[in-house]
Amino acid sequence: MEKIRVLIVDDSAVVRQVLEDMFDSDPGMEVIGSARDPFVAADILKRVVPDVITLDVEMPRMDGLTFLHKIMTQKPIPIVMCSSLTEKNSETALKALEYGAVDIIEKPRMGVKQFLEESKVIICDSVKAAAQARIGVRPRKATLIKVEPKLTADAVLEKPTSHAMIQTTESVVVVGASTGGTEALKLFLESLPLNSPGMVVVQHMPENFTAAFSRRLDGICRVTVKEAQNDDTVVPGRVLIAPGNKHTLLKRSGARYYVEVKDGPLVSRHRPSVDVLFRSAARYAGKNAVGVIMTGMGDDGAKGMLEMYEAGAYTVAQDEATCVVFGMPKEAIKLGAVRTVSPLEGIAGIVMRETR
């Protein structure tokens, strides 16, 4: 199996070393270079072309956005933005996704063992996903990736006390996305009318970035978009984005749908997890739900979507041609959990048709 070759660009020597140790400890990856700024990185790129670049957002001699733009206009390479949790960096990293970066990862913080262990899983998975991403050039052949065991949504969901319940005509939509999902969600949500059904979205993204992402979408969409808070009601015309680093579940009290935002372990290697959201939708909304699974690596959401399908929900998967990484939709399709496979641009119309 060919190893994924990674170039690290970060002005912090400590961060470079931590990332190098993470990647070198993964048998499917190797670091082919480490640079303190884009000028040093440019010299490395003259000699060797990596499969993926991890790129710092803020650097003294040239910022990450400028370097990203140069690479994407000259010789596109999958790039994962590496950012610390600040308001300014969040906005810049989101802008980088619009410019062609594949994903955002949070810079590893030192001294917290559990954080570093979870960081390794999330960061390495992001880089592996980037290596398979379509970025306007022919994608490289998918590599068989050995992954560690993962928890299921049982680790977060309480045991059911009753079925999905009292009759109601109110529809609710749940959406899951990962690599490439920020731009896919933007196109999808921009297409929705004001009277669209209430919606809950899990996009794999670090904490703090989901708040900035929600604000950005709210400014361009007709529907209201906000980062979900515990006990927020799911109402027509509003989209709730699961906060980074928290699981978000759909719940119901009588005819009222609301969300529960809670801590918990990584589920399907993610927090928030699409499986957690989808399984809660199967339990509490049943046939009143529509589930949408979009671009992303891995299988988070596939099992949850199958439960939705079996509960009578209408389920939709984004097609391969419009996915940045055809992983999550592919796994849901393989399980027989999907009623309709659609290009990205057709999903909003399907959602509105099935919730009338």
Image (cartoon, rainbow, N blue to C red):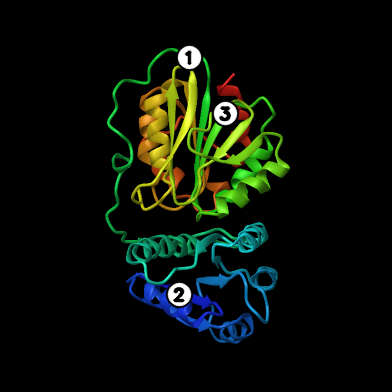
Q: Nearer the viewer, mark 1 or mark 2?
A: 1
**Residue marked by disc 3:** 198
Q: Quadrant of residue 39?
A: bottom right
- In this view, 17 is above or below 133: below
- Residue shown at 54% from the left, 66% from the top: 84
- Residue shown at 40% from the left, 13% from the top: 166
Element at badge 3?
strand
- Residue shown at 68% from the left, 39% from the top: 190
Query: Which comes sooner in the sequence, label 1 or label 2?
Result: 2
Q: Is residue 95 left or right of residue 44?
A: right
Residue 334 seen: no
The three-letter amino acid code for the residue at tag 3 is: Gly
- Disc 2 crowd, CA 10 A, few/some/many (<14, 14-19, 20+): many
- In this view, 308 is above or below 107: above
- In this view, 352 is above or below 158: above
**Residue marked by disc 2:** 5
Alpha carbons under labels 3 and 2: distance apart: 42 Å
- Of 73 and 156, the residue lying toward us: 156
